[in-house]
Amino acid sequence: MSSLTVLGGSAASVNTGQGCSGMLVSSGQTSIVVDLGPGTLLELRKHADFRTLDALVLSHLHIDHMLDIFALRFALSYNPIRPTRKLPLWLPPGGLEFFDRVAQVFSANEDPAAYFTDVFDLGEFDPEGHLEIGELTLSFHPTVHYVPCWAVRLRPADRQGDLVYTADYGPASGLEGFARNASVLVSEATSPEPAIEDRSLSGHVTVSEAVALANAIGAGTLVLTHMYEENDPTAFRDRATTIFDREVQVATPGLVVQW
C-alpha cells in the first residue's frame, strides 16, 4: 500500500494555518517529499523524520513550492541530532545554477560552495528519463506555466496504482496521456472560472479544468490543491463533486490518501 500525506495546499500565499505546496509520498520502506513550500516543513515534522527521507524532489523553482528548502537546510545543519547522510535533493533543469546563486546570497561567512552541498546531495532530474528512488519510480512531463515546471508521476514497485502530481499547469499542458489511469490525481485548482475564452496561455487551471483532467484519465481520487482561502476551497470542492463521480478531497495539512 502507498500513501500521500498533504503538507500544504495553499497557492502563492500561505492560507490561515496552512502552508503552500508540499506532499509526502510513501510506499513500502520509501518516503519522499515532492515540493516544500513555505510552512510545509512544520507539517512534515509531524509525519516523518526529515533526516531519513529517501529524497526530496522539486517540480519547479517558484518560492511557493520550495522556500522551506532553506529552513530544511538549517535543520539539517544545526539540529542537535545530525543526519547520518546527505539528503538527496532532485532539482529541475537549471536548478544547480539557481542554488549556486542563492548560496552566494545566503552564505554570509560560510563557504558558498558548501552551503547546500554539506547537507544535500544535489542533482538535476532528466525530464525525459526516470528517477528510481527506493520503491518509487518518478517520471516527468512539462507543463504550461510561467517558469519551467514539470508534473510528476510516481509509480510504486507493487504496481498497485500511480499518483500524478500536476504541480502548476495551464489547460494547454497536455497531461492526459502522461497521467492516464493514475489512481490518484493531485491537481492544482487555482483559478476561479475564467471570464475570458482563450485559456491557452494560462499557467493555472480552474476546478472544472482539474475535474476534466481527472475524468479524462480515469482517476479514482482527485485531490484539489493550490487554492487561496479567499476563493473558498469548500465551494471549489462542492463544484468538483457535481461533475466528478469519484472521491474528491481538498488538500489540507495532514490529509492522508491511501491506495
Image: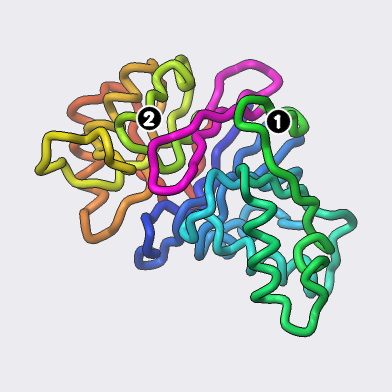
Where residue 222 sits in the image (x, y, percent)? Answer: 38, 31
Residue tagged 2? 173
Task: Tell us which disc is closer to us: 1 or 2.
Answer: 2
Quarter of the image for the N terminus: give it: top right
Label 1 crowd (10 A; few <14 / some 14-19 / many >=20): some
219 sits left or right of 259 in the view: left
**Nearer the observer, 56 or 3:** 56
Residue at image position (30%, 32%) is 171
User: Is 157 a magenta residue?
Assistant: yes
Q: Using the rendered image of the protein, determine whether residue 192 is visible from the camera's viewpoint.
A: yes
* Quadrant of the image occupied by residue 29: top right
187 sits left or right of 148 in the view: left
Instruction: Identify the residue at the far bottom of this view.
Output: 109
Residue at image position (43%, 30%) is 185
Q: Is residue 258 above or below residue 254?
A: above
Quarter of the image for the C terminus: give it: top right
- Tell me whether the residue at label 1 lies in contact with that at label 2, contact meaning CB atoms closer than 8 angstroms: no
Q: CA distance from mark 1 to mark 2?
A: 22 Å
Q: Is residue 44 above or below residue 184?
A: below
Residue tagged 1? 131
